[in-house]
Amino acid sequence: MTQSPQSIWTDVERIRAQAPLIHNITNFVVMNNTANALLALGASPAMVHAPEEVEDFIDISSALVVNIGTLDATFVAGMRLAMRKARTLGKPIVFDPVGVGATAYRNQISEELLTVAAPDVIRGNASEIMALAGLNAQTKGVDSLYGSEAAIDAARRLSSVWGSVVVISGEKDYIIHGDKTAVVANGHPLMTKVTGMGCTATALTGAFAAVNADYFLAATHAMAVMGIAGELAVAKKSSPGSLQVNFLDTLYELTETSISNRLQLTEA
Ligand SMILES: Nc1ncnc2c1ncn2[C@@H]1O[C@H](COP(=O)(O)OP(=O)(O)O)[C@@H](O)[C@H]1O
Ligand SMILES: Cc1ncsc1CCOP(=O)(O)O
Ligand SMILES: [Mg+2]
């Protein structure tokens, strides 16, 4: 199926009907936001990182989301075990290299995790995608210093080395796999004023990957839904605190019509 409002809606309905369990190993900042976003979309989130239990949790989950935002040695041990198990069981892995490029530790751990199990989808901002591809890119902590266009070549390289779908988020989101590119132009600049919106995009990608084994489509659908829900939330009230709450409500209230009316998706 090619990408369209209908194909996005089909996946939203699958998520709502199946409520797939999404196993998140994520950062302390966004655990609450991303769990609530997954619930509002219709998925069932669990934030589980203890090395003692992550493998058992993979057994019952439909996708794994790994996010290095507040990593430490225990988190990393859990990530390694969970990624290996998810790969063994053929469950989708979505990776968010938060802040890679900012410190040597983040660089070293991200590179190592890629070798433990190449993710099905990697989602980051432009600075993160460039840094993960080995470029000497500047980052401002967890925020990007570049527009998403700047990371297209880096995303292609990452995709060809690891076989992953690579998503660069920003004003325009680029979804890249091999020689395929989709561009989602939805969203609103105010989304950068709420912490964890990128992490939320990654978590929602896990839910779409749980119901659609074409991970290029799943990632594109997730970014379209993120952008459209962001726009609708800003239309309710254009301030960061309200956006954080209204974003959850718009995800929950999303309809096929709102997707058809707003979708700005092109393929190259
Ligand atoms: N300038 C912008 N205009 C529209 N949407 C944006 C803009 N910047 C970011 N977004 C959206 O905000 C969400 C988070 O992306 P981003 O800010 O790039 O991630 P991160 O928080 O990881 O840096 C994505 O859905 C993206 O499309
Ligand atoms: C602020 C912060 N610090 C460590 S992780 C984190 C959250 C980053 O979330 P996002 O990349 O989605 O803005
Ligand atoms: Mg981020």
Image (cartoon, rainbow, N blue to C red):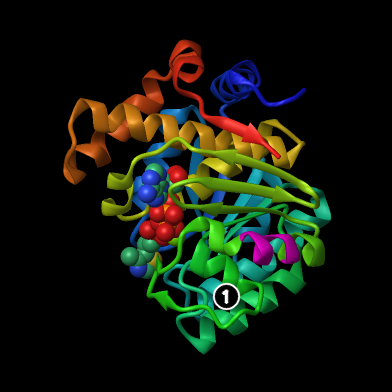
Q: Is residue 185 left or right of residue 23?
A: left
Instruction: Name the spot of residue 195 as percent of width and height, x first.
Output: 31, 55
How would you classify the magenta stretch by its main secondary structure?
helix
Q: For label 1, count other residues whose C-alpha is less than 10 Å away and answer few (under 14), some (14-19) or many (20+).
A: many
- Reply yes or no: does residue 106 show up in magenta: no
Q: Assign the N terminus to one quadrant of the image.
A: top right
Residue displayed at 61% across by 67% down: 79
Residue 34 in view of the camera: no
Query: In the picture, residue 39 is in which quadrant?
Result: top left
Instruction: Name the spot of residue 3 as percent of width and height, x first.
Output: 68, 26
Disc 1 residue type (three-letter): Ala
Question: Is residue 196 shown above or below 117?
Answer: above
- Reply yes or no: does residue 155 show up in magenta: yes
Span highlighted in magenta in the image: 152-157
Tell which residue pokes out farthest to the top in this image.
Answer: 257
Judging from the image, what secondary structure is the residue with disc 1 in? helix
Residue displayed at 73% across by 55% down: 86
Query: In the picture, residue 95 is in which quadrant?
Result: bottom right
Question: Is residue 112 shown above or below 168?
Answer: below
Instruction: Name the spot of residue 261 as percent of width and height, x first.
Output: 45, 16
- The residue that mark 1 highlights is 131
- Name the quarter showing ligand 3: bottom left
Q: Is residue 60 left or right of residue 233?
A: right
Residue 256 in view of the camera: yes
Q: Is residue 122 left or right of residue 44?
A: right
